Image: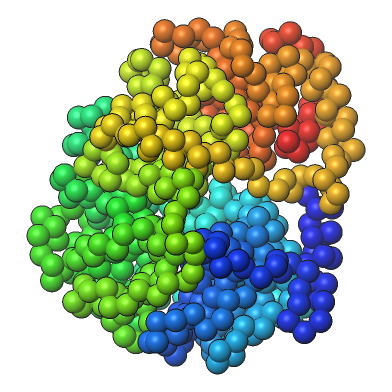
Amino acid sequence: MTRWFALALLLATVYAGAGGLADATSEPQSESHRSPADVAVLPDGGRALTATHTSDSISLLDLSAGKVLVEQPCGHKPAGIACSRDGRRAAVSNLWSGTVMLLDIGEHTLRPVATAAVGPLPRGIVFAPDGGSVYVAVAGAHEVVQLDWQTRQIVRRWPAPSEPRRVALTRDGRCLAAVSGRSAQVRGWETQTGKLLWERTIDNAFNVHGLSWAPDDQQMVVAHLHDRRHGISEQNVVEGWALDNRLTRLTREPDAKTEFWQIALDVRGKAVGDPCGLAFSQDGAWLALAAAGTHELLIFRNAIVPWNSGDPGDFIEAALAVDDAKLRRVPLGGRPMAVQFAGATNQAVVANYLLDAVQVVDAKSGEVVRTIPLGGPPQQSLARQGEAIFHDALRSRHQWFSCHTCHVDGHTSARNFDTLNDGSFGNPKLTPSLRGVTHTGPWTWHGWQTDLGRAVEKSLTDTMFGPKPTAHDVKAVLAYLATLDHPPNPQRQSNGALTPAAERGQSVFRGKAHCSHCHQGEYYTSTKNYDVKIEPDGSDYDLWNPPSLRSLWDRGPYLHDGRADTLEELLTVHHTPEKLGGQVLTAEERADLIAFLNSL
């Protein structure tokens, strides 16, 4: 990690003349999908920035004219974008480059200033009030960092397990909050001293992807899913006993009596799938939530939201469900992922990923007043059609969840779910990553599924209880799954080679540990199933298919039921080499083996 970071920092800060940066890619192609993943509205309220994820670029928009003013190349797969409070500076996090690009904003221009390495998989980003630094959620390193604008150096690091996704700063600039998608943890720090103020975990929450401070600086709201920990049966899904969608409110100063207030979002028969980005209007009158899975924007009158200090139940308060004056559900289509309000207006600006567009919605009337195309191909490829199906909660019974809900961004939510896929009740399984899935058959933990197309159909009909997909639908989803690749591995050296420790670990892997008996080939898996000396799980299957070991550094917990929190625990307690035909390892050999596993 250290060598990778040092070289990335060196390369990222090479300035190649006016407007040119080593991290910048070639000019975005007009036929590329833009897929805006985030949006930042400039203080004037008339312009906005978008992080266009699949074209490796950012765009500056004129919201009133409804047009793109300029599109600027950036790093690979930009995920988060922010502007300074004076509207003169911008910063974008480049997910697969492990960098943040810093830019100056002109009236109709974006001028790159520098690019700095921050660590693997940076996501959410926000400026300090004076614009002198930015705070970045570095998901792959499980930390939040503060990057200085002038020196391009990281001046502070805070741990934020596991997979921080969003960061938000109070208006007074004194309290920084971050939410972690997999651990459902919310942390707050005092920015002046760096002191950790509090850490709170929202019980049974996952996919914590939305975060916003209220204008009063005293409370924040978080958007997430809630795991009821019941089997994914049709009745449980219909009744809201499987997965719920919720908002949670937390106070800046923890309340000794009540830690959280929550509301349920789901209407019986018409749930709110995959809540994502959220934002308050400047005056605090409105709270807007992008529901990515159900392709809509929810707009609440903030003052009358019925927060509940206990369990809010499975369905939304009846008064909200039937009253447009209190809550509007505005259909947008596509996949709305992020939202911000435009200045002091009632207009919400939404980044819609699958529409390749930004939409402007009037909160008071609930009307889409403008759609701004960002560019893209005139027709969707088969893979893009499959991507839309994968993220579509309307494909599930009563639209509670999508494929993305469990397999976040085609990866994993790191949660155990009892999908009944092994033919038994009461045996929840860890959600596997789908990266490289088209190369890693057979599928399921027991390896009983030998046809990935049938697995897709079964998931849509028997897990999500949605309508049977057409043959074209299945083909499209398979095309999308084939695009799910592994991100760059930060555990390798700058040239992609193994570190000395990982090289020693490779020898242990192939020899003394006997791992390569089951984990073979490019993806470190096998077409065979094995007895791995794990107690029966209550299903009809005794054998197990070895999961791919690629991208272990970005996974965890481990084993079929997530019983091992770390690779150290896995190799010393639950899956020891000596039980599986190998030999007892020394502590040094085990450390080297873990270094190799994390390098895959």
Percent of width and height locating residue 373: 42, 72
Q: Which residue is depicted at the point 57% across and 17% down?
A: 545
Q: Which residue is depicted at the point 52% across and 32% down?
A: 432
Q: Quadrant of residue 572?
A: top right
Percent of width and height locating residue 146: 65, 69
Quadrant of the image containing the C terminus: top right
Q: Nearer the viewer, residue 261 or 464?
A: 464
Is the residue 336 above or below the residue 191 in the image?
above
The way the protein has been coloured in the rendering is: rainbow
Number of labels in the image equals 0
Q: Quadrant of residue 281?
A: bottom left
Task: State whether residue 398 appears in this view.
Answer: yes
Q: Nearer the viewer, residue 543 or 32?
A: 32
Q: Quadrant of residue 359?
A: bottom left
Name the residue at the front extreme: 378
Q: Is residue 558 left or right of residue 275?
A: right
Percent of width and height locating residue 478: 48, 36
Q: Nearer the viewer, residue 471 or 524?
A: 471
Q: Is residue 66 left or right of residue 267?
A: right
Percent of width and height locating residue 184: 45, 49
Q: Which residue is depicted at the point 21% across and 72% down?
A: 366
Task: State whether residue 205 appears in this view.
Answer: no
Q: Is residue 407 left or right of residue 506?
A: left
Q: Which residue is depicted at the point 81% across and 20% down?
A: 510
Is the residue 375 above or below the residue 248 in the image?
below
